[in-house]
Image: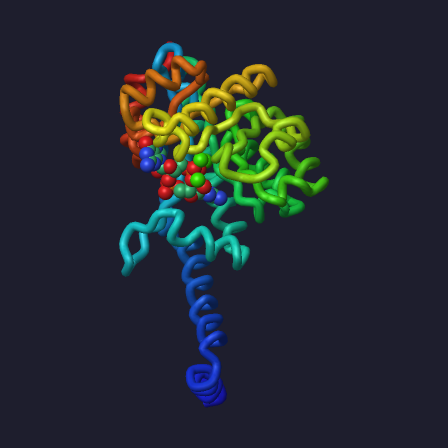
Amino acid sequence: AAKAAGKNRVQFFSPALLQLDDRAAAEAELRAAVADGQLVLAYQPVVSAVDGRCTAVEALVRWHHPVRGLLGPDEFLGLAEETGAVLELGEWVLRSACADAAGWDDGSTPVALHVNASPVQLAHPQFVDLVRAALAGTGLAADRLVVEVTETTVLDSPAVSATLDELVGLGVGVALDDFGTGYSALTTLRSLPIGIVKIDKSFVAGALTRTADAAVVEAIVQMAGRLGLATVAEGVESAEQEAFLRMAGITALQGFRYLRPAPVAEFGRWLAGNRRP
Ligand code: C2E
Ligand code: CA
Ligand code: CA
Ligand code: CA
């Protein structure tokens, strides 16, 4: 009865608190989804600009919601980050993706596994332990894993910088995601142990029609090359975009042109026909 009274008070006098109430419910639902196996991973390949073969694969999370259907990360990651539920979600993603990737070994050239890490995960003091445990638990070699981070203020913190150094010490790679859209891009490249720069898909989308976007892509590729970093273009959809990117000197390509993010079995079949000997 006390709870009902509380609800009424909230409904009639405080819309903001009612929203909080809804958010609490959504958070509980998300945490339950992780525990109940409602999350799934989609896999999208990264292919070499030189020979078109698969060099890496990115794991992308989805939520099979029992009522709302299949949800993309943009529909639930914000809430997951604000509530901290992204810690459980991220742990599930890391373990599941490492387990899948360990199963793709067949004696041919290994494919690197890229996993996205939210700033909330990176700032968590146990993140390196979590990565170590996921590798040990699945048998995936550390040099097969790449953690994708985005440019946020979190990257400026000494603790996160130390975390990235520790990961690299283990043999894990670090990629800077959505490059060009964040802030302080150039200092980030200099101060953190980044090995791969992923050029945001907005620049790729505009590269053929907007000279400014083309110039940004060319400048990033040249600068990354001088810093000894590999470059991946995201969101490649057409042969014309691919041709431009290769001419610009890009290292690798990712996008619908090669494969849309696919369930693990479908990606496995694609990989069988597209891997390096
Ligand atoms: P992202 O890391 O930049 O991932 C690339 C996004 O571009 C994916 O969207 C992918 O489906 C989409 N994409 C791939 N190729 C193309 C293309 O050719 N054209 C276009 N228009 N789009 C393409 P998705 O799967 O909806 O993921 C959105 C974002 O959610 C990701 O952006 C990433 O920031 C985040 N995310 C996804 N999975 C995870 C995860 O497990 N953990 C965390 N922390 N974030 C994740
Ligand atoms: Ca990414
Ligand atoms: Ca990206
Ligand atoms: Ca993104």
Q: Position of residue 248 (x, y in %)?
A: 43, 16
The colour mode here is rainbow
Viewer-closest of 166 and 152: 152
Which residue does the image show at 29% across and 28% down from the upper left? 237
Residue sitting at 36 percent across and 31 percent down? 206
- Ligand 2 location (quadrant): top left
Say if residue 264 shows up in the picture: no
Furthest toward the front, the residue is: 211
Tell me what residue is drawn at x 27 percent, y 20 percent.
239
Q: Quadrant of the C terminus?
A: top left
Residue 17 picture location, percent across and down = 49, 76
- Tell me how many marks there are: 0
The quadrant the N terminus occupies is bottom left
The part of the image, by quadrant, that contains residue 107 is top left
Q: Is residue 52 above or below residue 199?
A: above
Residue 224 image point, x, y percent: 55, 20
For the view shown, which residue lies furthest in the right direction? 158
The residue drawn where x is 59% and y is 15% is 226
- Residue 218 drawn above or below residue 160: above
Residues 36 and 230: in front is 230
Q: Who is closer to the viewer here, 23 or 64?
A: 23
Q: Quadrant of residue 273?
A: top left
Tell me: 88 left or right of 30: right
Quadrant location of residue 244? top left
Q: Position of residue 79 (x, y in %)?
A: 46, 57
Q: Is residue 151 visible?
A: yes
- Pick the residue in front: 66 or 214: 214
